[in-house]
Image (cartoon, rainbow, N blue to C red):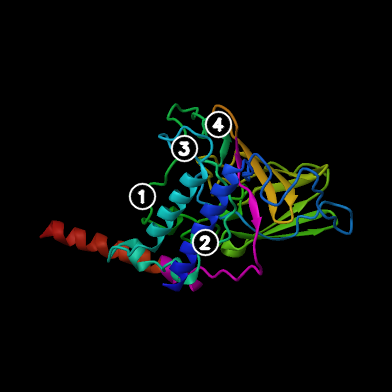
């Protein structure tokens, strides 16, 4: 109850502040304008080797969807619309689950402070993370099926462990990137810089992406990884990271081993990083597309992430599937 009260106070204060700033013509959006507290003359602090300092703990927790809803035409929410949407999401997150459903037997995000309403949310009034195409939606697919990714075959996912989603198998989850995307919870990152390298540690399943800053030879085509192979370089205040050589085992919106991801990191203030990414895969979409997912400073440290130790969950799920098959076969015989 106390948490709910504090959350209501936070939303109310945020609404009043944003509304007042809007009336005064002072409201600055995270994108494309500068975030609150930033100014055009801001220069990021430097690391000992002279690079813009991106280090620290950051979050991309957000309620902004990747794609704009088809019934929304505006690029930005008004402050009133934003906080109305936020309040509705909080109500749904805290609603009682239906007994016997997956949500009921899964742990409660709100109980452990994992849901987005309890995270450090950057003020992003965009109606979609996608900024190009201008309609805020994924481009058309080359197979003519429209935007969006291919879903897994739910009818066969429990036939064998290899058919199950890799997130369920605790191998890797979406937050690790690239691109970096809000994973729904544990959407936190630690950026560490050292001479010649930038490392991004992800809280969700604790993946670490080590990005060399060099112009060395390209990796061989046959060398492929879950998160691809990244290489970065600085252009002024912006870190640009190019990633390819994905193994295809973790598709992103339907794009697998052929995708190429370009990420940009520009620090806009002490508390915000302008993070954008462009995804290309000519075997999936008829054009590339770009999204903006700003990073806001949060409190560290990155916590240990434990999925299901010794993978009992997978064994039990598959055992249950085999039992259901036996019962169905017996019912047919009778």
Decide which of 213, 6 is in the foreground and name it. Answer: 6
Quick check: 213 above or below 145?
below
- First in sequence: mark 4 or mark 2? 2
Q: Position of residue 137 (x, y in %)?
A: 50, 34
Q: Nearer the viewer, mark 1 or mark 3?
A: 3
Quick check: 55 above or below 268?
below
Q: Is residue 135 left or right of residue 318?
A: right
Residue placed under numbered mark 2 in the picture: 10
The CA distance from mark 4 to mark 3 is 13 Å
Residue placed under numbered mark 4 in the picture: 283
Residue at image location 57% in from the left, 53% down from the top: 17
The CA distance from mark 2 to mark 1 is 40 Å
**Residue 278, picture quadrant:** top right
The CA distance from mark 3 to mark 2 is 35 Å
Q: Position of residue 222 (x, y in %)?
A: 67, 44
Q: Residue furthest left?
A: 334
Q: Nearer the viewer, mark 2 or mark 1?
A: 2
Quarter occupied by the C terminus: bottom left
- First in sequence: mark 3 or mark 2? 2
Decide which of 226, 45 is in the foreground and name it. Answer: 45
Residue at image location 63% in from the left, 51% down from the top: 227
User: Does 297 appear in magenta?
Assistant: yes
Residue placed under numbered mark 1 in the picture: 154
Quick check: 200 above or below 153?
below
Q: Position of residue 101 (x, y in %)?
A: 30, 62
The CA distance from mark 1 to mark 3 is 17 Å
Report the magenta residues as a range. 290-314
Tag 3 and tag 2, C-beta contact below 8 Å:
no
Residue placed under numbered mark 3 in the picture: 148
Q: Nearer the viewer, mark 4 or mark 3?
A: 3
Density class for disc 3 (Cα within 10 Å; few <14, some 14-19, many ≥20) is: some
Residue 174 appears in the picture as rendered: no
């Amino acid at each position: 109850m106390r948490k709910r009260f504090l959350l209501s106070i936070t939303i109310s204060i945020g609404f009043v502040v944003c509304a007042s700033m809007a009336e005064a013509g002072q409201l600055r959006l995270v994108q494309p304008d500068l975030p609150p507290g930033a100014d055009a003359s801001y220069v990021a602090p430097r690391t000992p080797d002279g690079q813009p300092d991106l280090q620290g703990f950051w979050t991309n927790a957000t309620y902004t969807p990747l794609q704009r809803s088809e019934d929304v035409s505006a690029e930005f929410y008004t402050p009133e619309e934003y906080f109305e949407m936020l309040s509705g999401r909080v109500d749904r997150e805290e609603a009682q689950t239906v007994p016997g459903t997956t949500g009921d037997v899964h742990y409660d995000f709100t109980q452990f402070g994992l849901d987005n309403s309890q995270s450090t949310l950057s003020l992003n009034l965009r109606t979609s993370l996608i900024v190009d195409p201008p309609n805020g939606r994924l481009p058309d697919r080359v197979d003519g099926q429209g935007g969006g990714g291919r879903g897994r075959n739910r009818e066969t996912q429990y036939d064998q462990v290899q058919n199950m989603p890799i997130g369920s198998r605790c191998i890797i989850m979406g937050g690790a990137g690239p691109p970096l995307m809000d994973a729904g919870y544990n959407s936190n990152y630690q950026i560490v810089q050292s001479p010649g390298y930038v490392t991004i540690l992800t809280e969700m399943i604790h993946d670490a992406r080590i990005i060399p800053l060099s112009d060395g030879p390209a990796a061989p085509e046959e060398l492929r990884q879950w998160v691809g192979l990244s290489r970065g370089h600085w252009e002024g205040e912006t870190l640009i990271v190019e990633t390819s050589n994905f193994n295809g085992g973790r598709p992103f919106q339907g794009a697998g081993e052929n995708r190429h991801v370009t990420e940009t990191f520009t620090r806009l203030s002490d508390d915000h990083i302008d993070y954008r990414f462009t995804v290309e895969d000519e075997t999936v979409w008829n054009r590339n597309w770009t999204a903006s997912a700003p990073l806001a400073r949060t409190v560290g440290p990155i916590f240990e992430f434990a999925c299901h130790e010794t993978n009992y969950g997978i064994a039990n799920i598959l055992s249950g599937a085999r039992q259901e098959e036996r019962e169905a076969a017996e019912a047919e015989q009778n």
